[in-house]
Amino acid sequence: MIAATAIAVSVFLAFQVASELLDSELQDNAEDQLRADSRVLATTMEHTGLAQVQLPPYPGSGRLVRVILPDGSTRTPAGQPALPPVSGHAWRVAQGASADLMESNDSDDDGYLIYTLRAGDGAVQVARNNDDSPINRFGLGMLLIGLLCVAGGALVGRTVARTGLAPIDRLTAAAVRVAQTRDLDADIPDEGGGEIRRLIQSINDMLAALRDSRRAQRLLAEDAAHELKTPLTSLRLNVELLIRLDRRGTLDSALPAESRTRLLNDLGAQVAELSTLAAELTDLARGDVSDESTELLDVADVVVAAATRARSRVPDIEVALDVTSVWVGGRPAALQRAVLNLIDNAGKWSPADQPVQVRLRAEGASAVLEVDDAGPGIDAADVPRVFDRFYRAESARALPGSGLGLSIVQRVVDAHAGRVTVARSARGGALLRIILPAAAPPARITLAIAGVDTVAR
């Protein structure tokens, strides 16, 4: 429809312009012919006389002739159709007021183009019909050509549109098939060119990302099921033991107070472990999706808050802080969780008389956070997998934990365009280092109110 409309408008405009040019050209040619015929008749009449000149009979078509005599009368060839009355301007030409005159009379059904030329004591007039038939024939031809062009343009436009949109139709069908079958392994054939090819490639990239996401989700579910199996089995066995002994009425005799206390403590520890594992699984499963907004924050405040939480959760842990103010753009809760996981991990390995050391400083355009302990350190064979989900070194399997803490740390650091590394500390334990891009601190404004200086960030 667009192609047909464009062609129709183009043909209409071309017809208008061509008609005007053709009409102007025909008008100029007719006027030139009338002037030439008038000069020939005027020359003859000046030699013979206006009243005595022999006017040729009217041939039935073509030009018309009229002689204006000095007394105001007129002469016309025999059989010639009557011309419109002599106009006042033409009378003035015959009286010598003007040399010639070109006038058009289109008010009647038969319009005439009349040229008046001074000749002797009068004037001679040569006229012709204002024939619009050439313009009409030209318009009819343009109309037919325009209709053909519009029909052809519509057909060609539809063919081109359908050919160009065929890959889109196939792409739509493939997308519907994927939505119905949930089969993300079927790539859409890369065809077409330009924008269509880029669109297909983008959709294939999206399908690949969805495949990776589904695969990661499946692996997470499998790993979670594996990790939950052991504590759930242990918890169920202990609870079933208590229920069975209670039903038999032998709970007090079969389980002395000391054993019962130890069993209840084990149950509490298993429930706490399950709660921690569930929270870490939830946090890990959310991936990068978070409602927390990014803001400009001082990492020193985040580290202090994480250390406070670590002390409240494990009162026996000792944390030595050596921090300076370093500003970054990030999510405070996510960063605090990452620092807390590092401190908790270090607290598991650090001896009771050795504190976990946490240092924060600025190095160039980076904020560097280091957490080290005085434990046995991480074996070189375990370093490549220390940030994998659910991975626990052979020596760490007897300790509480899920193997998700450091994985969450790496995810948070990656989301903040940073990096995390593992090394051996000077005390022989593990040294985990987080490096984040630093940001310029906010401007500090000093206010003097009622004689009191206040510094505001």
Image (spheres, rainbow, N blue to C red):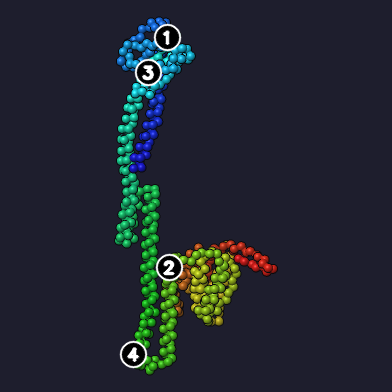
- Name the residue type under label 4: Arg
Earlier along the polypeptide chain: callout 2 or callout 4?
4
Answer with the quarter of the image where residue 88 lies.
top left
Q: Disc 2 designates what residue? A: 286
- Name the residue type under label 1: Asp
Real-space Cα separation, disc 2 to disc 4, in angstroms:
43 Å
- What mark, if any, has residue 82 been given in the picture? none
Secondary structure under tag 1 reads loop
Q: Residue at x 33, y 53 (%)?
A: 171
Which tag is nearer the camera, tag 3 or tag 2? Answer: 3
Q: Is residue 265 above or below residue 161?
A: below
Real-space Cα separation, disc 3 to disc 1, in angstroms:
19 Å
Question: Can see residue 456?
Answer: yes
- Name the residue type under label 2: Arg
Q: Disc 3 designates what residue? A: 84
Q: Disc 1 designates what residue? A: 71
- Residue 408: x %, y % from top left: 46, 70
Alpha-carbon neighbours of circle 4 within 10 Å: few (<14), some, or many (≥20)?
Answer: few
- Residue 304: x %, y % from top left: 56, 73
Pointer 3 and pointer 2: residues touching (CB < 8 Å)? no
